[in-house]
Amino acid sequence: MNHIELTDESFEREVLADGGPTVVDFWAPWCGPCRMLAPVVEELAEEYAGRVKVAKMNTDENPGVATALGISAIPTLLFFKDGKLVDRAMGAAPKAALKRRIEAML
């Protein structure tokens, strides 16, 4: 497992204050498309290890950040660079499309 699990409490420290390129997958256990996307997110975490932080946030257990960021549907991936939101992908996007978004952020 190359991704990190985020909570409402750790989000600011791990994503905003860290400042490095970060992809956050907002998901929930009951969400079918989230489960379909999970292996893709894990593959991206492996491929970009050391270059991009990949994190997952369970919105059922941590609704605060998702609400604050306007997450209205899951799965949603948010892309952060220098502590700022730079891109957003909603739904179970194909791996190639997500890689393009990550490369654009680097």
Image: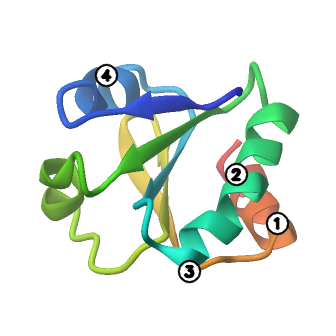
Label 3's element?
loop
Q: Which amino acid does the dot numbered 3 rest on?
A: Gly
Say which of marks 3 and 4 sits in front. 3
Residue located beneath label 3 in the image = 91
Q: Which residue sits at x=45%, y=31%? A: 5
Mark 2 and mark 1: Cα distance apart in space: 8 Å
Residue 30, horizontal then vertical, whole percent: 43, 69
Pointer 3 or 4: first along the chain: 4
Say which of marks 2 and 4 sits in front. 2
Q: Which amino acid does the dot numbered 4 rest on?
A: Ala
- Viewed as shown, does residue 83 lie left or right of 91? left
Q: Is residue 38 above or below residue 19?
A: below
- Viewed as shown, does residue 6 lie left or right of 61? right
Q: Which residue sits at x=73%, y=37%? A: 45
Q: Residues within 10 Å of mark 3 (few under 14, many from 20)?
A: few
Quarter of the picture holding the N terminus: top right
Residue 104, horizontal then vertical, whole percent: 72, 56
Label 1's element?
helix
Residue located beneath label 2 in the image = 41
User: Which residue, as the protein is rendered here, is positioned at the far front?
Assistant: 30
Mark 1 and mark 4: Cα distance apart in space: 27 Å
Residue located beneath label 1 in the image = 95
Pointer 2 or 3: first along the chain: 2
Mark 3 and mark 4: Cα distance apart in space: 27 Å
Q: Which residue sits at x=27%, y=24%? A: 10
In the foreground, 79 or 36: 36
Q: Which amino acid does the dot numbered 1 rest on?
A: Lys
Mark 1 and mark 3: Cα distance apart in space: 12 Å
Q: Is residue 32 above or below residue 83?
A: below
- Viewed as shown, does residue 17 lie left or right of 106? left
Label 4's element?
helix
Q: Which amino acid does the dot numbered 2 rest on?
A: Val
